[in-house]
Image: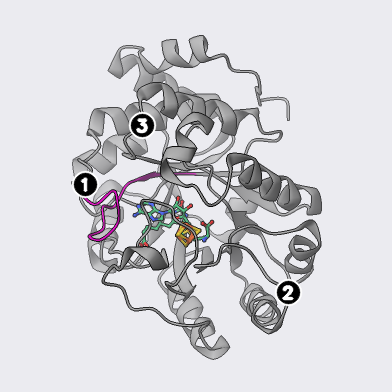
Amino acid sequence: MEHQKHNWTLDEITALYHTPFLELVRAAQDVHLQHFKLGEIQVSSLISIKTGGCPEDCSYCPQAARYHTDIEKHALMQDDQVLELALKAKAQGASRVCLGAAWREVKDGKDFDRVVGMVKQISSEGLQVCCTLGMMTEAQALRLKDAGLYAYNHNIDTSEEHYSNIISTRSYGDRLETIRNVRKVGVTVCSGGILGLGETLEDRLKMLQNLSAMSPHPESVPINTLVPVKGTPLENQGAVDIEELVRMIATARIMMPTSFIRLSAGRLGRSLSEQTLCFMAGANSVFSGEKLLTTMNPAEDVDEKMFLTLGLTRMTPAEVHAAL
Ligand code: SAM
Ligand code: DTB
Ligand code: SF4
């Protein structure tokens, strides 16, 4: 990809991040305009097809079995119920649905066969389908691809250095391997991280460096801010400053000009003007629907009002595909 740079140095990234705020936002918008139209937003909707009971120890996650959080656990959802939720998301303007399972890894067997069936069914409705199912082999990725999978989400979350402070049950290397498996079979990659895990600015910038080192860049880069959940080790983490979130989005936009940068978890606590700043800085994707996986997201009517007020439009699956 001629517009992609994969060898950003930490010095370059640091200098970029510290550019005077208005100049940084302006530079990000210039880059944004070279590859996308301002105000055209890719909208994804999450469906938690299997909730809670996860054996991993990700310190931010309400679905880790060991943390005793107040969530409604359920086994793999029935196919017709998943289809119904997907069609509802489509009717509300989503171009993509993302099926999330609280699994450490994909295991071959009946449940995976059913997920493959769901992917086939939903993609035949003209929706892009994304899955986030934990670690996965190349053979499993290939089965999903053959069923019509468009994207696979697997976040690197933070820097390699900070990763072991947050998760001990798997390594950064495990994460990268799954992403490589996804890439190998030709499914697009969705990978990003979370701000607010007690990381330093250097950790955040190294995370962007690691994402941009992937070749090609992930087609989608979700920038989440931690949704602190009672019962998890990170329940008392403070909120991320809007100025820092906007700088991260702008820096990500400049480093990965052709990627969709998603303003992801953590949108509920942000005002219209804060979200506007994020869109001005290069964010061009959001999750819609009043629930993320287990936590809340802005309600449909609140988002509809934001789209109308700002004159934002929802991209169709074909427009999203053509922009890549
Ligand atoms: N189990 C699979 C995995 O870990 O890849 C898929 C589901 S997992 C919930 C997907 C992503 O959600 C995580 O990688 C993490 O980045 C994000 N996430 C989980 N809990 C979060 C929270 N409380 N706040 C923000 N993001 C969160
Ligand atoms: C991503 O980066 N964020 C989404 C999606 N990819 C899978 C998940 C956010 C989850 C927030 C916590 C919850 O609702 O459980
Ligand atoms: Fe499990 Fe994924 Fe939550 Fe980690 S982030 S505990 S792997 S569901």
Q: Disc 1 marks which amino acid?
A: Arg
Q: Which of 305 and 278 is in front in this view?
A: 278
Q: Nearer the viewer, residue 73 or 182?
A: 73
Residue 304 in picture, x, y percent from top left: 29, 62
Task: Give the residue drawn at x 32%, y 47%.
Answer: 226
Q: Disc 3 marks which amino acid?
A: Glu
Q: Name the residue under label 3.
A: 199
Q: How is the image coloured?
A: one colour
Q: Between tags 2 and 1, which lies in front?
A: 2
Residue 248 in picture, x, y percent from top left: 39, 29
Secondary structure of the residue carrying tag 3 is loop
First in sequence: mark 2 vs mark 1? 2
Secondary structure of the residue carrying tag 1 is loop
Q: What stretch is highlighted in magenta?
A: 222-235
Quadrant containing the C terminus is top right
Dominant secondary structure (helix, strand or loop) of the stretch shown in magenta: loop
Mark 1 near ligand 1 (CB under 8 Å)?
A: no
Residue 289 in picture, x, y percent from top left: 35, 67
How many residues crowd mark 1 within 10 Å: few (<14), some (14–19), many (20+)?
Answer: few
Q: Disc 2 marks which amino acid?
A: Asp
Structural distance between the alpha carbons of marks 2 and 1: 40 Å
Structural distance between the alpha carbons of marks 3 and 2: 35 Å
Q: Name the residue under label 1.
A: 270
Quadrant containing the N terminus is top right
Q: Name the residue under label 2.
A: 108
